[in-house]
Amino acid sequence: MKASEIRKMSAEELDAKLLELKDELFKLRFQQAINQLENPTRISAVKKDIARILTVQRDAELHGTDA
């Protein structure tokens, strides 16, 4: 997911996507713990997407814009 795509989302969409990504990260970590993870690079990609969303949310908070 690119930052430009994230910036186009509303605040509600960002919150929903953030919850979805955190849930996916939990499931990926669980799969890794029981040695069933097929694509280990997906963990870092999900973590980066979470960070991008948090960055956009913080930017909107500081500058007073609606996401």
Image (cartoon, rainbow, N blue to C red):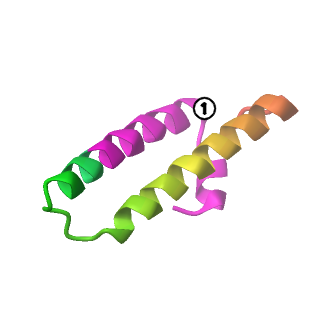
**Which of the 4 image quarters holds residue 44?**
bottom left
**Which of the 4 image quarters holds residue 36?**
bottom left
Quadrant for the C terminus, please: top right
Q: Nearer the viewer, residue 54 or 67?
A: 54
Relative to 40, residue 17 above or below: above
Q: Nearer the viewer, residue 6 or 32?
A: 32
Residue under pointer 1? 11
Q: Main secondary structure of the magenta part?
A: helix
Q: Residue at x 51, y 61 (%)?
A: 1
Q: Position of residue 13 (x, y in %)?
A: 51, 36
Is residue 67 highlighted in magenta?
no
38 horizontally vs 18: left or right: left
Q: Position of residue 7 (x, y in %)?
A: 66, 49
Is residue 19 highlighted in magenta?
yes
Q: Position of residue 6 (x, y in %)?
A: 60, 51
Q: Amino acid at mark 1?
A: Ala
Q: Residue at x 68, y 45 (%)?
A: 55
Q: Which residues are magenta?
A: 1-26
